[in-house]
Image (cartoon, rainbow, N blue to C red):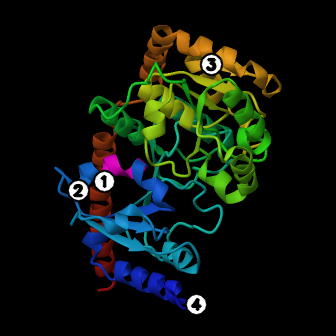
Amino acid sequence: MFRFPGQSLLEDWASARRFQALPDAARSIVFYAEDGDSWPHFEPIVRELTGEMGREVCYLTSSRSDPVLRTSNPRIRPFCIGEGLVRTSLFLSLRAGVCVMTMPDLQTFHLKRSQAQNVHYVYVFHSMVSTHMIYRKAAFDAFDTILCVGPHHEREIRATEQTYGLAPKKLIPCGYGRLDTMLASRRAGSSAAPNRSAPAHVLVAPSWGPHGLLETRGVELCRVLLSSGLRVTVRPHPMTRRKWPECIREIERGFGGEDRLTLETGVAAFDSLESADVMISDWSGAALEFAFAYERPVLFVDVPRKVNNPEYERISCEPLEVSIREQVGRVISPDRLADLPMHLEALMRDGEGIRARIQRVRAETVYNVSESGRVGARAIAEIAGGQETEDRRQETEGEQDGR
């Protein structure tokens, strides 16, 4: 459908006004999604809140293709607010009890804490990786409560607070919703076991950045895998598609006619994850999701670390994405890509051994496996209840002061 210039902006303003016009009780719990990929991380929590708990939630999204905009759940009120001036303004004037986000760096860039109300900000992780190397230095400092994936997040955040003299945040041992959804899909029988009579299926799912695996070695990697007779799915990170599209076009030009290579443009579906025998990655959190959900190995190509916080070594915790790699797979040098087939074969041969190791590491690394939605929903509902009580107290004090 054709849109006149400015039409989308007008729609965003109208949507923001509809949200702000709601009664306070309707804005008690607000979720904000920067894109449609946020929903898999919110879904287990929202499902619990709007299900047996009977709560209503507002869902602000910056994506016009967000699946929540088409929801049939009467307890979810969705609003598209875009990603420009409307969003910035709405955040500054936000009136809500609790605002739940998967987007870090609150207060650092254009999204600020509300100046209109004492909103309680809750962070939900969209990756299981550590907080202090891949994320920016102050990524979580402005949040009031953090729903931690595992003990590593609690240790790192407390160490960060101590190092920089920050006020302590409320840390909830929660878990990881996307992992729970993947495990549920697997238990329901939709996870296809690898077909041992067909060529082995290798899923390439790295992180993104100037030193990322696809950005630096994508064509060479695909050539080695295909020349070994393997079936390959390349699943670029959304930020690779956005900021380094040329590396994807090079793969398309080089292997567009190869029927054993699939280029997957979405990251929400589980099909390629479910059918892969092994994953190749670098520093991506998707590697941990794959290993923990399907109990299959990961081969890590040791490109330079993804470092967004140059001070990360001040935090005396080894990042999880560094320490865990040898426990769920193997690590090889990017200069030895020719050895990939040999290492892949060894990993797939050690099926039961690596499965047992992954199960042990998962139990040690992730809280409340298969229960994170319930835990997160109860924590958010409790915070919202406390915020409502505090708001009423402040209103009462204001009325008394005005007499």
**Residue 325 percent location from the top left of the image:** 62, 22
Does the CB distance between marks 3 and 2 fall below 8 Å?
no
Does the CB distance between marks 4 and 3 fall below 8 Å?
no
**Residue 7 percent location from the top left of the image:** 51, 89
Residue in the image at 46% along x and 27% along y: 292
Q: Which residue is mark 3?
A: 344
Would you say residue 44 sits in the magenta stretch? yes
Part of the protein shown in magenta: 41-46
Question: SS class of the residue under badge 1?
Answer: helix
Residue in the image at 17% along x and 56% along y: 54
- The CA span between labels 3 and 1 is 39 Å
Position above or below: 40 against 233:
below
Residue 262: name its quadrant.
top right
- The CA span between labels 4 and 2 is 37 Å
Q: Which residue is mark 4?
A: 5
Does the CB distance between marks 4 and 2 fall below 8 Å?
no
Residue 46: which disc? Answer: 1
Does the CB distance between marks 2 and 1 fall below 8 Å?
yes
Residue 75: name its quadrant.
bottom left
Could you tell which of marks 3 and 2 lies nearer the N-terminus? Answer: 2
Q: What is the crowding at mark 3: few (fewer than 14 residues within 10 Å), some, or many (at least 20)?
A: many
Could you tell which of marks 4 and 2 lies nearer the N-terminus? Answer: 4
Amino acid type shown at disc 4: Pro
Amino acid type shown at disc 1: Val
- Callout in the foreground (4, 2): 4
Would you say residue 233 sits in the magenta stretch? no
- Callout in the foreground (4, 1): 4
Residue 392 is left or right of residue 244, and the answer is left
Residue 203: name its quadrant.
top right
- Callout in the foreground (4, 3): 3
- The CA span between labels 4 and 1 is 35 Å
Amino acid type shown at disc 3: Leu
